[in-house]
Image (cartoon, rainbow, N blue to C red):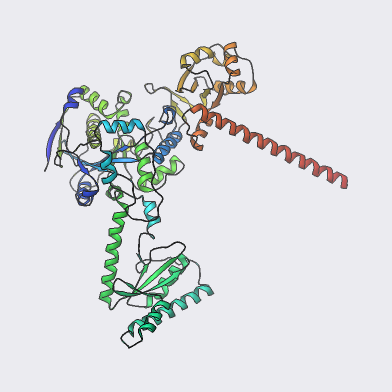
């Protein structure tokens, strides 16, 4: 059933009073029945919007994305957050635009990480940011329901690692690449396996003959003959993947057997050889195992099936904060995050080839700085542009259910349509055609850094969010160790006229309560200031007193090193202190090593002279 709504110009208060659009709430109990419906929605739509509700974003003010961050440091911060916090709700909205009408199919999946199948994986653990949990609680989020009814999942990497442990894997259909040539040990192993299986099959075929019960039991015990379901089976221990390959190859000549990899035990791997009565019985067993593996795989992967469907559809994915959200998606549902931004984007784009960040569309109309979040962006555009958008939503409203985060994805869809309308970008795709992005969208696709629409890496950053003026990171100096309570203006007053390096234009901005940055707008002055600080050259009395009290300075590379090394302490000053001390210790050790090498060289020269 489709419900129709009209999204048009309203005041902020009217926006809040407007009746919420229905978003289908999906939990563990209705996940299986929803997947088929969701799959149809994905493949019949032209775009997919996603939105995440997490347990936190950052642990300290300096650890959030700042205007001074480059793509590299921004990625390291997003990586830190994704590895530490957890996704509790994942909203997905497949949508299309037909005849200027937005047709949406919103779903809100409630997640909670747990192991549905005992596969020997490490227990899940994650951090929570109190402000995020408080906000969710105020919106009526049911944490008990999330813990008990949230949908579990494994990432692709976790599932690959756990496949062997989750149960039998059919080996008949596996294709093994030929590695090295057969060795003598390989030949002996293969012949022993072939003889053993042949003798076992003969014994199974001769079971109708009269035989003492005790002898029969002993024969089964010695031969490790067992029952697989209702069929006789033989267990063969293997020590390596090479022996698995050899066993599979050598037993191909036996027609009515099926090979399955037995559930792994500690330090032991095994293959079960199952004997079937006919070709038809063999096909039936293979089908049973494949169905069981498929069901087991669905149970193990859980919510990741949704991620796989989005990936398979190859639809453009619309998001509001691509770097942060996709760092979480990669970490939780694909694989551990790589160390660099380049590796991250390379890995991600193989799964999601078209990612559209609404922030870059907002930059296209030059109003990004007035739009801090979805609600303010929509309110601002609604006041400036009077166009209305009809929306059809396919989900019936569920009474009695509190829809918390699911409506953010609806606002994303609406804002995306609104921005495209303002920019004169047509989103209508002809029936049965492939989603070919318009040129305007192609230009801003797959950009993960919201500071500026530039790629590859650039070392120019902005200092203030509301200003477009940029500066090279080489012209920034971090200051810390000043008295508690000092403001940026206080620091600037102290620095003014304290030395010739401050005779030209410069600015000071606080990064957190313990650290500030000095912005030298004249190239080269930052290096001069750092050199003077290291040399102990005299400044004015006030600055001289601050240096004697512990004022320190460092360049941007030190800040970058803090992010790379994982020094994520609450105060940036403490991190910079530790980083500079490590640099000094490393430099001292290197100098000492060079001195020792020089002494050794001199001693060698003296020995040579004595010999002469």
- Which x, y percent locates residue 238? 45, 69
Q: For residue 315, which quarter of the picture?
A: top left
- Which x, y percent locates residue 131? 34, 30
Q: Which of 119 and 469 is in front in this view?
A: 119
Q: Nearer the viewer, residue 182 or 272?
A: 272
Does 31 appear above or below 219? above
The residue most toward the front is 214
Question: What is the number of callouts on the image?
Answer: 0
Does 179 appear above or below 125? below
Q: Can residue 113 be seen in this view?
A: yes
Please give left or right for residue 14 compared with residue 310 in the image: left
Please give left or right for residue 104 compared with residue 538 in the image: left
- Which residue: 73% across, 39% down? 596
Q: Which of 146 and 334 is in front in this view?
A: 146
- Which x, y percent locates residue 61? 42, 27
Does 122 appear above or below 254? above
Q: Nearer the viewer, residue 478 or 465?
A: 478
Q: Is residue 90 visible?
A: no
Quadrant housing the N terminus: top left
Please give left or right for residue 220 compared with residue 586 in the image: left
- Which x, y percent locates residue 500? 58, 14
- Which residue: 50% across, 67% down? 180
Does 301 appear above or below 507? below
- Which residue: 32% across, 33% down? 133
């Amino acid at each position: 059933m489709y419900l129709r709504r009209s999204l048009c110009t309203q005041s902020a208060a009217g926006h809040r009073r407007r009746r919420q659009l229905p978003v289908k709430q999906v939990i563990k109990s209705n996940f299986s029945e929803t997947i088929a419906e969701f799959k149809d929605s994905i493949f019949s739509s032209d775009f997919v919007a996603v939105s995440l509700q997490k347990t936190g974003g950052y642990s300290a003010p300096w650890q959030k994305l700042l205007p001074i961050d480059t793509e590299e440091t921004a990625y390291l911060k997003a990586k830190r957050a994704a590895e530490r916090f957890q996704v509790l709700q994942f909203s997905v909205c497949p949508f299309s635009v037909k005849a200027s009408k937005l047709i949406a199919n919103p779903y809100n999946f409630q997640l909670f990480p747990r192991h549905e199948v005992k596969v020997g994986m490490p227990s899940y653990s994650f951090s929570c940011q109190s402000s995020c949990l408080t906000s969710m609680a105020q919106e009526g989020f049911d944490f008990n329901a999330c813990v008990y009814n949230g949908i579990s999942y494994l990432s692709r990497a976790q599932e690959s690692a756990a496949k062997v442990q989750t149960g039998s894997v059919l080996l008949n259909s596996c294709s093994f690449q030929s590695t090295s040539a057969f060795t003598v040990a390989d030949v002996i192993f293969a012949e022993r396996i072939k003889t053993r299986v042949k003798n076992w099959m003969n014994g199974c075929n001769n079971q109708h003959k009269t035989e003492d019960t005790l002898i029969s039991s002993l024969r089964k015990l010695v031969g490790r003959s067992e029952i697989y379901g209702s069929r006789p089976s033989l267990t063969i221990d293997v020590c390596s993947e090479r022996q698995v390959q050899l066993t599979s190859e050598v037993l191909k000549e036996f027609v009515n057997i099926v090979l399955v990899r037995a559930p792994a035990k500690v330090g032991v791997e095994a293959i079960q050889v199952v004997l079937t009565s006919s070709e038809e019985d063999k096909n039936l067993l293979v089908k049973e195992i494949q169905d069981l593996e498929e069901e087991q795989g669905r149970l193990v992967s859980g919510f990741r099936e949704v991620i796989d469907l989005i990936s398979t559809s190859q639809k453009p994915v619309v998001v509001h904060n691509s770097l942060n959200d996709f760092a979480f998606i990669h970490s939780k549902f694909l694989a551990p995050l790589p160390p660099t931004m380049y590796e991250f984007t390379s890995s991600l784009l193989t799964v999601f080839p078209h990612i559209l960040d609404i922030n870059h569309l907002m930059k296209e109309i030059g109003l990004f700085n007035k739009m801090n979040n979805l609600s303010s962006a929509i309110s601002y555009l609604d006041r400036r542009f009077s166009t209305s958008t009809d929306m059809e939503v396919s989900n019936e409203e569920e009474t009695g259910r509190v829809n918390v985060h699911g409506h953010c994805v609806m606002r994303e869809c609406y804002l995306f349509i609104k921005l495209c309308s303002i920019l004169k970008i047509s989103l209508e795709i002809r029936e049965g055609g492939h989603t070919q992005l318009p040129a305007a969208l192609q230009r801003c696709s797959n950009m993960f850094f919201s500071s500026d629409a530039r790629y590859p890496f650039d070392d120019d950053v902005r200092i203030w969010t509301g200003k477009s003026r940029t500066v090279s990171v080489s012209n920034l100096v971090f200051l810390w160790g000043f008295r508690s309570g000092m403001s940026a203006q206080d620091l600037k007053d102290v620095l003014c006229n304290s030395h010739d390096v401050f005779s030209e234009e410069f600015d000071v901005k606080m990064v957190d309560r313990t650290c500030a940055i000095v912005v030298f707008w004249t190239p080269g002055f930052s290096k001069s200031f750092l050199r003077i600080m290291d040399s102990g050259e005299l400044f004015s009395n006030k600055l001289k007193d601050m240096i004697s009290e512990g004022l320190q300075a460092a360049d941007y590379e030190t800040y970058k090193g803090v992010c790379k090394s994982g020094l994520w302490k609450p105060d940036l000053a403490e991190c910079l202190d530790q980083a500079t001390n490590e640099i000094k210790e490393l430099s001292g050790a290197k100098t000492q090593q060079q001195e020792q090498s020089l002494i050794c060289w001199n001693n060698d020269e003296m020995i040579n002279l004595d010999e002469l």
